[in-house]
């Protein structure tokens, strides 16, 4: 069946793209433009309603079978992007017999079914369309391109080699099984197993790219935490006041550093709590401190013990900062940096330090990482099956290798699993 949909966003725009995919694509062009177009050549055409009234003048392109995104014949109408034109063209197409509106993700599903792209690429494409930060885009394009798929295809090839060795072994009687073949099989299996385990570890980085990095500002009351979040977030996130104990709730602000999504978190300052609300605030501050990827411990220069009662134990990702360098120093702490939010001194150095920490946390792996639960589940099953071939029974080894092969293969091509495919494609919008 031939399907059609508006592929650009709903509403008014400069240009709108209406896409038709299926055996009748060329017929649709003929009907609407009265022309037969040269394949893959943009042609300016009049679009007709009921063969006479002109709806619009549009660029129209015809893609032949196997030379389109879906692998089917495709027609693309690049019309002026008014709501009236879009609706008139769509209803003109709908009049043609043998056509129906496309379902969400149906163009992509057809691309997958015709072998144009594999499932890892489909999932990458969904992420590419949804990417909000530079980092998310970079990772999505690696999943959509060949980088991620090649990893899985290479493992599949290696496991296939194992299977070939084992099948050769089965042809021998028990006593004659060449020890060498078994050895080689185990060696390859071990190598793949290790590589899969390393790949599974990259999932943490995906979480950071997706959810971002949490930076909590922790310190005693009045040290300037709210002044700092306002400075870093470039807006009035929190109330600043000379009265200690001003901030009691947790306040958040979002921004990006070098294409990485960051949540800045302001917390209640530590002091002897005066009431239940403050006690709760401090409890929440502690929780944020524990959950943060980076903690900025902020103390006051004019206090004898700027971190008294905080029990700070900075990890490699934390930054110890003394604020209020404009006031007289009363402590003998050696912080990572001394700043003044009032006089704006050393603030750019603080931001450089923050960026360094972020980079360290967000970029341990530069290539394609693990981004999908579905892929993870198959990888775990592949790894388990490979681990199970340590025994000597050749039949069991063979079964496990087949199991590993089936799981690794399902990452790029789920066979007979309509339910999983349904979930994947429903994540797309109509028109993609
Ligand atoms: N002299 C001086 N004062 C500062 C500096 N930074 C902030 N302050 C002042 O210190 C006071 C407390 O600032 P806040 O940013 O509200 O401090 P806080 O840590 O959020 O305080 P709580 O929410 O009560 O824990 C305000 O009066 C600020 O104007 C600085 O660098 N020098
Ligand atoms: Mg505050």
Image: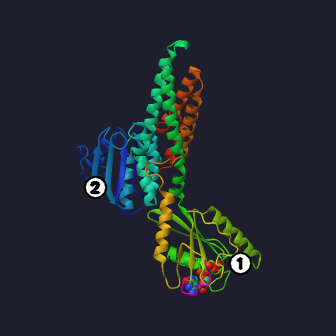
**Does mark 1's beta carbon lie closer than 8 Å to ligand 1?**
yes
Asked whether the viewer can see residue 425, the reply is yes
Which residue: 55% across, 36% down? 383
Q: Nearer the viewer, residue 214 or 178?
A: 178
Q: Nearer the viewer, residue 295 or 100?
A: 295
CA distance separating discs 2 and 1: 68 Å
Q: Which mark is residue 148?
A: none
Q: Which mark is residue 271?
A: 1
What span is in magenta? Answer: 325-332
Give x and y (percent) for residue 355: 47, 66
Q: Nearer the viewer, residue 115 or 98?
A: 115
Q: Which mark is residue 58?
A: 2
Indicate which disc, 2 or 1, sits on the residue closer to the N terminus.
2
User: In terms of secondary structure, what is the magenta stretch mainly?
Assistant: loop
Tell us which disc is closer to us: 2 or 1.
1
Judged from the image, the secondary structure of the residue bearing numbered disc 1 is loop
């Amino acid at each position: 069946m031939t399907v059609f949909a508006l592929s650009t966003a709903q509403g008014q725009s400069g240009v709108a793209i209406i896409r038709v995919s299926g055996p009748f694509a060329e017929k649709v062009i003929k009907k609407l433009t009265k022309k037969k177009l040269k394949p893959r050549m943009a042609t300016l055409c009049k679009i007709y309603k009921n063969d006479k009234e002109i709806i619009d003048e549009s660029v129209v392109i015809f893609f032949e079978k196997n030379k389109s995104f879906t692998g089917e014949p495709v027609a693309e109408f690049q019309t002026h992007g008014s709501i009236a034109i879009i609706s008139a063209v769509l209803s003109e197409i709908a009049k043609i017999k043998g056509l129906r509106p496309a379902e969400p993700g149906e163009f992509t599903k057809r691309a997958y079914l015709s072998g144009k792209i594999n499932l890892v690429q489909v999932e990458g494409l969904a992420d590419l369309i949804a990417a909000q930060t530079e980092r998310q885009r970079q990772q999505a394009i690696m999943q959509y391109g060949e980088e991620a798929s090649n990893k899985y295809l290479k493992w599949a090839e290696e496991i296939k080699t194992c299977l070939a060795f084992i099948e050769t072994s089965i042809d021998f009687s028990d006593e004659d099984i060449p020890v060498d073949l078994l050895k080689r099989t185990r060696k390859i299996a071990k190598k793949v197993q290790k590589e899969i385990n390393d790949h599974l570890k990259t999932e943490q980085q995906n979480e950071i790219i997706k959810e971002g990095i949490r930076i909590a500002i922790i310190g005693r009351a009045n040290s300037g935490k709210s002044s700092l979040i306002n400075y870093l977030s470039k807006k009035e996130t929190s109330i600043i006041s000379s009265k200690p104990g001003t901030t009691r709730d947790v306040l958040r602000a979002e921004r990006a550093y070098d294409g990485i999504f960051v949540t800045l978190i302001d917390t209640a300052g530590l002091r002897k709590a005066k009431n239940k609300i403050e006690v709760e605030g401090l409890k929440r501050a502690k929780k944020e401190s524990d959950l943060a990827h980076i903690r900025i411990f902020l103390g006051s220069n004019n206090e004898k013990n700027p971190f008294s009662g905080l029990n700070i134990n900075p990890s490699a990702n934390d930054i110890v900062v003394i604020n209020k360098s404009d006031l007289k120093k009363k402590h003998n702490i050696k912080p990572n940096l001394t700043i003044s939010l009032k006089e704006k001194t050393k603030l750019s150095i603080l931001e450089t330090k923050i960026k360094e920490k972020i980079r360290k946390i967000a970029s341990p792996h530069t290539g394609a990482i693990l981004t999908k639960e579905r892929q993870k589940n198959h990888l775990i099953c592949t790894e388990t099956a490979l681990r199970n071939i340590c025994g000597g029974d050749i039949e069991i080894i063979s079964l496990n290798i087949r199991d590993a092969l089936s799981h690794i293969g399902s990452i790029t091509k789920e066979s007979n699993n309509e339910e999983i495919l349904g979930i994947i494609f429903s994540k797309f919008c109509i028109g993609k």
